[in-house]
Image (cartoon, helix red, strand yellow):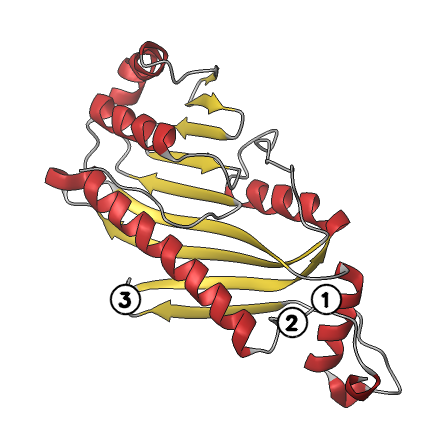
Amino acid sequence: MAYAIPVAPWTQQIELRWQPDLHFYERRTEILRSLEAEGLLTGFQWQDKRIGARLGQFEVVYVTDSALSASINGPRTSSQGVRAAISMALDALEPINVTLHGMTFQYLLPISGDGTLAQEQTARRLAPEILPEATPRDWAILLDGRSTRLQSDFQVEFGVLRAEEMAGRLHGRLATFMPELQEPSPVDLSDLPDGGMYYRWEWQMASLLDEDRRMEELIELWVAAAEQSEQHSEALQRGRGLADIGKQETNESR
């Protein structure tokens, strides 16, 4: 069955875990050879306890004896290659009790106007109590919750970013997701907006995948979490009166 993720996170990461298995040490070369044979492999990394495969400019997969981490780091990058690499790795290793441990999505929703103005404007809306003695300039909100649909806990961080803040935030959060990487995977920084609402959704899934339909179930959960992340991001932006941020304020709104 073919699946497509109908949303466009700027970056998306996924992590699978399973019981430590010696098959990794016997079959890690097979995984890389299979990716090369399919024309997916553009670079690789070999360490004592981990292999890494680069599938394109913004796609990487890391595999150990007990986990797999995959990252897609561009809004225009297809998930097709990463999905194929995950499937090949699982077929080669035949791990037991594979769990979808977590997923992370980062979004940048463009705003109209200047990012600095938008930060100040929304900060005043969120903290009017301290005016005029103090002037709020920037803000961020961190929210913990649980999805009844996915039966999963989540944490979302959101706020306004200026253009010059975006690269550092996207790279920094990626390194947080996979701290074992010595160098963060490249992120597509082309066509960054002048200002944007930044959303980072971290899903704590801990979902045991059905062995008979492992990839199907994985993609279903992946799509569902991405859809919820996008829908909730848009709802938060509308509900808190942030849809028109970045526009010049009138005297009445000051």
Badge 3 amino acid: Arg
Q: Is residue 23 visible?
A: yes
- Residue 43 is left or right of residue 37, and the answer is right
- Who's the residue at 27% across and 44% down the image? 219
Give the percent coordinates (x, y) of residue 242.
Answer: 62, 72
Q: Give the image quarter of residue 250.
A: bottom right
Q: Is residue 97 visible?
A: no
Quadrant placement of the C terminus: bottom right
- Who's the residue at 64% across and 38% down the image? 189
Disc with the residue nearer the chain's start (3 vs 1): 3
Give the percent coordinates (x, y) of residue 127.
Answer: 72, 82
Q: Which mark is residue 244?
A: 2
Instruction: Between residue 148 and residue 63, name the one nearer to us.
Output: 148
Q: Which mark is residue 246?
A: 1
- Who's the residue at 28% across and 62% down the image? 150
Question: Are the two marked residues, 1 and 2, in contact with CB atoms closer than 8 angstroms?
Answer: yes
Q: Which residue is mark 3?
A: 149
